């Protein structure tokens, strides 16, 4: 067990935590935006998968990882558009539609992958990283934290940008009112449907980018169902973070570390079966929910469609 | 930013011509004409169900009329959305507060600014305070709105409407949540606003407020505007004549109010006195202005249809008013109920005897609901004890207390009292699921269930297409009858009513109050929680005032009750 | 509870004039068969876009799933587990609980039963061992749902997330058990010890149809009767329709919530057991048929009515068996079934919405 404290283990763990954590972070931030506005977005897993597939497809055919991220955002947006139309505009049950969108995205991406790549299973080349001068030279964790693809830095920066938007802009207030008491927002003259639609679309874009990161940076290829619950973990993060993006960041790192434990332990020479390690992140989620579940505070109008004039 | 008085002082800012709006099964507004002029307080008077709220919704852009025209500043304009209404200078303060509870007052003001803008909290707060002080109000602009009292939230909304440059301020049933003093203050505020040239539209069902605060009164009845009293005429009429005219317009000649022989102030609840049947009211309809200070615009008809009452006629002069009061059946000692932060109910003590009606007055949200729930067994108490027939029932759950005869009629008819999609027959047995004879060994017995339903529907005059109809389809008044039927049937001995006539139309209000009275006459110990002071004064033997979870005091229902209750309500506030 | 079920709205208007029986039948056809047809059409379009002839696909599905005797037997056998799943979902959804953990409950119970089955069959006569396996499965399912149940009942934690997490956890755990704890040393491929065919659930009338079908039918019918005729079922429905009213009526909501979880998960778990002791005989590593979420649209389509569910489960079973054949023959993998189910759910929600709006307009 002394392998655990070696440099290799720590480096591998931190490296993996970031790699696995960024998709969780993006999913969590996205879900947070939706939930703040009052939409319970259970379809986020589908948005991530759509983003992963489309992101991979675009990156593969164009040869550019950056275009791949654009494709990922597009994939997530497609699914989010459906959700916005059906749930926000028409007012259909958010949970039922969310499940349907996730199932549909799982099936469609798996189907498309089968027809396009199942024979060849192509891989992407490793993406180039952007080292931050100075910081990336720190021993052990420097490269793992500060010599990463730029999207990593952008994702972290987004956390603070979002925190600023929530607290300091009129849009943030509009979002909060949309989830708290949409009738009040309507009476104030703001288009509630528009605000909620924007929130859902933003979620889709972020989730899609997260999925693209998973495929293009994390794995280098697309495998059906590869998100494996990342979107749902994002929902948990959003629920527990109580409206604070920074807590989503911390939670994403924690769960990312759990997800990457397999590789890290293998590097450390500890031989624990993969399946056992794969239980770890979900067991961690359950533990966190047991400890802090009661404190999850959710907007009052979460999950309820807004209909003007309804009593 | 108070709007300057318009140059053409007499011309209406907003005019409605032939406005009609329908909902499934009902015409809410039927060819209504209305003109809203600057500088006057225009009262929209009508009972619940008259169509006032629908009209307001159309004025504020939440609904569109099916027929008719709306003119703003003389030009025909649809008011397509709240944004449009605000653009025309129409500001609305709704009956149910339209502020996001988790945001501060200032943040609520900032809603709707361009999305990238950084709301200048300091500047907004300064503007808010300036306007508020000019109106004689003081509210902390950085307070979280959910933590303000309802009166303060209302005031904040009024200030917000003015900050937006409203020329028309619509107040929808604004006084239902206020103390008598709060009502006075609001009335004075309305007059100040009118003095500045604002057009104030005040919606109410209380005749006295209409007369006290209004310049012009438009009367609505069942969707139609049945009359209008312009300012000159209103000033010319005294309160009595105005009242008579309005009541006549509101309720029509076929239901003219009973000319009472006595115009004396209300006597204590007259059981065993008055007419036959189960109608022992002596409360006069017409009262001298100022004699009792208030008026309930409901027709107290001497002779209703012969509704079968499940209760025997009141005991004539027997054993109640003049003899010694029987021993209390329900005794509450030092009851405390936990709440968020502070206790919801703290050290409440009260007693009710069989046949007695104890009214509980107080503004909403002072612990009345929690008290009722704790007595019913729905909410755990943190201290004190409740005795029924001398025996403590603190450990008993809702079902057990119910079987002992302790019943609770909730104010939240559809949210809590019934299950909307379920049939009337099942809702009538909602608190007896699994009990014989309706269930036997776990399986239901449809014949018994139906028989029970038919009997109760007949006895309580529930208007429903059938006993299988989902209860959510019934009108509010009939849902209330279902609740009453359920709680009053089967050996009820102590019944707690929470706001039993809230939101009902006049007929159903009368019917419900009659039921309560009849039930008490038959010996049921009654606790009547209500925010309607008139109702309490009409029905109660004694009135307790609740404030901040405590009983501020209890008074007998005599001539000075109204005044003393008002004092207790204010006194407890300070 | 039609629009209520899918769209969460409760109508509150005066009733319209009742349509005649012909009108009612037409209405039912539109509202129930319509979504199925539309889903098949739209899915067919997807197939077309992917370069496969939808008519060939559906034709093959029908032929292999329904029209051939061999296929029909497989379809009917598969209905057993699916019916148990439907029963479990009906209990949960009618009580207002989103039990999305049926896949985990199914798999874990399947593995435990696969491990316990052979030794039990060796030691005890069949008519004792097999029911014992079902009981064991129910206990496993109930135990696996305990954590989400407690979190929901006493902490108000949303069960969508907790049950989903338990599914991921359960799937991995099941794999661990198969590969490590219960692995059959005699085989090269990791799997549990196979239950001999003779020890499995008896076949029906000399066919290869598993008697799991009868058990499944029994489960659905019993659940239906329980929900509609018993006091307990009514209490569950009250909790599902209006939790606040349930509290007001004095119902013990936390205890009922836990009971619902246990029942629902127990039934889903028995589905897994029936699949193993009826058809599969063992569990291979990484085996996960994932029927759980796919059955959800079926119970919605049936408006939570037990008897209607049977019909729709049958249709889905045909699609499932036929789809597996089509996967081999036409090269369309079974993921396609997920797409069909997703489209069905969405179309059903839209049809409900349109129906609701139409009824409102009629009342105006």
Image (cartoon, rainbow, N blue to C red):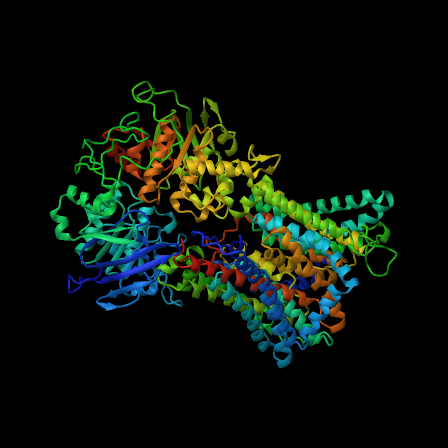
In the foreground, A37 or A91: A91
Which residue lies at the image location 57% right of the left edge and 37% below the top edge?
A: B445
Picture layout, residue A144 above or below residue C263: below
Picture layout, residue B95 above or below residue B292: below
- Percent x, y for residue A282? 65, 55
Picture layout, residue B150 above or below residue C34: above
Numbered-mark total: 0
In the foreground, B392 or B13: B13
- Left or right placement of residue A245 versus residue B321 in this view: right
Q: Is residue A141 visible?
A: no
- Residue extending furthest toward the left: B236
- Residue extending furthest toward the top: B323
- Percent x, y for residue C315? 67, 61
- Left or right placement of residue C315 versus residue B202 in this view: right
- Residue extending furthest toward the right: C186
- Left or right placement of residue B228 versus residue B30 in this view: left
- Percent x, y for residue B437? 56, 32
Picture layout, residue C88 above or below residue B299: below
Q: Which of the image's four quarters has the C terminus of chain C?
A: bottom left
- Left or right placement of residue C23 versus residue B108 in this view: right
Q: Is residue B77 visible?
A: yes
Residue B2: which quarter of the image?
bottom left
- Percent x, y for residue A158? 51, 66
In the foreground, B20 or C6: B20
């Amino acid at each position: 067990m002394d392998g655990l404290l070696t440099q290799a283990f720590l480096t591998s763990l931190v490296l993996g935590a970031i790699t696995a954590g960024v998709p969780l972070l993006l999913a969590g931030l996205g879900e947070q935006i939706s939930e703040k506005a009052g939409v319970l977005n259970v379809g986020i897993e589908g948005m991530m998968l759509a983003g992963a597939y489309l992101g991979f497809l675009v990156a593969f055919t164009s040869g550019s990882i950056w275009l791949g991220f654009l494709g990922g955002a597009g994939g997530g947006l497609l699914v989010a558009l459906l959700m916005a139309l059906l749930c926000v505009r028409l007012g259909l049950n958010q949970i039922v539609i969310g499940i349907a969108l996730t199932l549909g995205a799982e099936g469609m991406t798996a189907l498309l992958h089968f027809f396009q790549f199942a024979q060849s299973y192509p891989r992407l080349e490793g993406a180039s990283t952007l080292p931050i001068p100075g910081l990336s030279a720190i021993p052990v964790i420097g490269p793992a934290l500060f010599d990463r693809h730029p999207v990593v830095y952008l994702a972290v920066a987004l956390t603070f940008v979002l925190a600023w938007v929530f607290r300091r802009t009129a849009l943030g207030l509009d979002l909060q009112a949309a989830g708290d008491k949409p009738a009040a927002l309507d009476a104030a003259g703001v288009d509630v449907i528009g605000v909620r639609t924007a929130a859902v679309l933003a979620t889709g874009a972020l989730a899609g980018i997260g999925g693209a990161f998973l495929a293009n940076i994390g794995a280098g290829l697309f495998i059906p169902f590869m998100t494996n619950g990342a979107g749902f973990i994002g929902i948990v993060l959003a629920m527990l973070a109580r409206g604070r993006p920074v807590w989503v960041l911390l939670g994403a790192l924690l769960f990312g570390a759990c997800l990457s434990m397999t590789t890290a332990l293998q590097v450390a020479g500890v031989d624990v079966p993969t399946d056992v390690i794969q239980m770890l992140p979900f067991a961690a989620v359950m533990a966190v929910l047991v400890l802090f579940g009661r404190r999850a505070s959710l907007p009052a109008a979460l999950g309820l469609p807004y209909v003007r004039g309804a009593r | 930013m108070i709007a300057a008085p318009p140059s053409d002082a007499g011309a209406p800012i907003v005019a409605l011509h032939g406005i009609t709006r329908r909902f499934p099964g009902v015409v809410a507004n039927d060819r209504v004409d209305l003109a809203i002029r600057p500088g006057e307080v225009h009262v929209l008077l009508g009972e619940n169900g008259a169509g006032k709220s629908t009209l307001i919704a159309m004025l504020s852009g939440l609904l569109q009329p099916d027929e008719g025209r709306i003119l703003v500043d003389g030009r025909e304009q649809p008011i397509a959305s709240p944004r449009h209404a605000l653009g025309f200078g129409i500001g609305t303060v709704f009956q149910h507060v339209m502020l996001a509870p988790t945001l501060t007052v200032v943040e609520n003001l900032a809603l709707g600014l361009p999305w990238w803008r950084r709301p200048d909290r300091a500047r907004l707060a300064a503007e808010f305070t300036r306007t508020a002080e000019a109106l004689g109000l003081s509210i902390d602009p950085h307070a979280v709105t959910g933590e303000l009292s309802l009166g303060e939230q209302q005031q904040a909304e009024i200030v917000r409407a003015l900050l937006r440059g409203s020329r028309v301020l619509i107040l929808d049933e604004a006084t239902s949540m206020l103390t008598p003093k709060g009502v006075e203050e609001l009335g004075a505020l309305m007059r100040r606003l009118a003095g500045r040239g604002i057009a104030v539209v005040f919606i109410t069902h209380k005749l006295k407020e209409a007369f006290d605060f209004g310049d012009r009164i438009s009367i609505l009845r069942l969707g139609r505007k049945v009359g209008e009293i312009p300012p000159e005429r209103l000033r010319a009429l005294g309160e009595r004549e105005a009242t008579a005219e309005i009541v006549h317009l509101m309720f029509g000649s076929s239901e003219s109010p009973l000319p009472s022989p006595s115009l004396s102030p209300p006597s204590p609840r007259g059981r065993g006195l008055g007419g036959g049947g189960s109608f022992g009211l002596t409360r006069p309809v017409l009262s001298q202005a100022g004699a009792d200070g208030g008026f309930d615009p409901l027709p107290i008809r001497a002779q209703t249809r012969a509704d079968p009452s499940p209760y025997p006629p009141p005991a004539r002069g027997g054993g109640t008013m003049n003899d010694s009061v029987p021993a209390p059946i329900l005794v509450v000692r030092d009851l405390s109920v936990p709440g968020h932060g502070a206790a919801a109910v703290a050290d409440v003590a009260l007693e009710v005897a069989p046949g007695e009606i104890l009214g509980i007055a107080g503004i909403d949200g002072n612990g009345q609901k929690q008290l009722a729930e704790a007595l019913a067994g729905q909410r755990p108490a943190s201290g004190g004890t409740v005795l029924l027939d001398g025996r403590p029932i603190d450990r008993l759950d809702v079902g057990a207390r119910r079987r002992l005869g302790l019943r609770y009629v909730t104010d939240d008819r559809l949210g809590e009292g019934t299950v909307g999609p379920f049939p009337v027959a099942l809702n009538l047995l909602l608190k007896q699921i699994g009990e014989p004879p309706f269930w036997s060994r776990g399986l239901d017995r449809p014949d018994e269930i139906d028989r029970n339903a038919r009997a109760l529907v007949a006895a309580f005059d529930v208007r429903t297409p059938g006993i299988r109809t989902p209860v959510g389809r019934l009108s509010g008044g009939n849902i209330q009858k279902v609740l009453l039927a359920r709680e009053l049937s089967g050996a009820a001995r102590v019944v707690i009513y929470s706001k039993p006539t809230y939101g009902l139309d006049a007929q159903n209000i009368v019917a419900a109050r009659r039921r309560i009275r009849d039930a008490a006459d038959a010996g049921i110990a009654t606790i009547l929680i209500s925010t309607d002071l008139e109702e309490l004064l009409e029905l109660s033997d004694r009135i307790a005032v609740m404030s901040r979870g405590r009983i501020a005091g209890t008074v007998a229902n005599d001539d000075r009750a109204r005044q003393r209750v008002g004092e207790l309500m204010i006194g407890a506030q300070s | 509870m039609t629009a209520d079920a899918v769209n969460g709205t409760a109508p509150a208007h005066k009733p319209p004039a009742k349509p005649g029986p012909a009108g009612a039948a037409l209405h039912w056809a539109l509202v129930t068969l319509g979504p199925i047809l539309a889903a098949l059409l739209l899915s067919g379009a997807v197939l077309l876009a992917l370069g496969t002839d939808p008519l060939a696909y559906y034709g093959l599905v029908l032929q292999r799933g329904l029209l051939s005797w061999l296929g029909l037997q497989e379809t009917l056998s598969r209905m057993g587990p699916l019916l148990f799943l439907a029963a479990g979902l009906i209990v949960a959804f009618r009580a207002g609980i989103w039990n999305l953990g049926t896949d985990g409950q199914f798999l874990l119970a399947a593995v435990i039963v696969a491990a316990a089955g052979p030794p039990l069959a060796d030691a005890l006569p069949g008519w004792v061992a097999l029911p014992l396996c079902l009981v064991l499965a129910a206990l496993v399912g109930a135990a696996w749902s305990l954590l989400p149940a407690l979190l929901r009942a006493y902490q108000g934690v949303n069960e969508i997330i907790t049950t989903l997490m338990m599914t991921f956890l359960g799937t991995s755990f099941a794999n661990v058990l198969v590969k490590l704890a219960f692995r059959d040393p005699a085989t090269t491929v990791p799997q549990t010890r196979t239950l001999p065919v003779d020890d499995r659930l008896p076949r029906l009338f000399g066919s290869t149809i598993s008697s799991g079908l009868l058990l499944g039918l029994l489960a659905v019918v019993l659940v239906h009767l329980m929900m509609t005729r018993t006091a307990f079922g009514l209490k569950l429905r009250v909790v599902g329709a209006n939790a606040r009213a349930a509290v007001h009526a004095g119902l013990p909501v936390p205890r009922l919530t836990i009971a619902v979880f246990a029942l629902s998960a127990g039934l889903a778990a028995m589905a897994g057991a029936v699949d193993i002791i009826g058809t599969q005989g063992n569990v291979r590593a990484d085996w996960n048929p994932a029927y759980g979420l796919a059955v959800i649209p079926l119970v919605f389509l049936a408006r939570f009515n037990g008897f209607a569910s049977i019909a729709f489960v049958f249709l889905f079973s045909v699609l499932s068996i036929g789809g597996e054949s089509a996967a081999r023959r036409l090269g369309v993998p079974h993921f396609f079934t997920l797409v069909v189910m997703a489209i069905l759910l969405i179309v059903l929600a839209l049809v409900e919405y349109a129906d609701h709006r139409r009824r409102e307009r009629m009342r105006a």
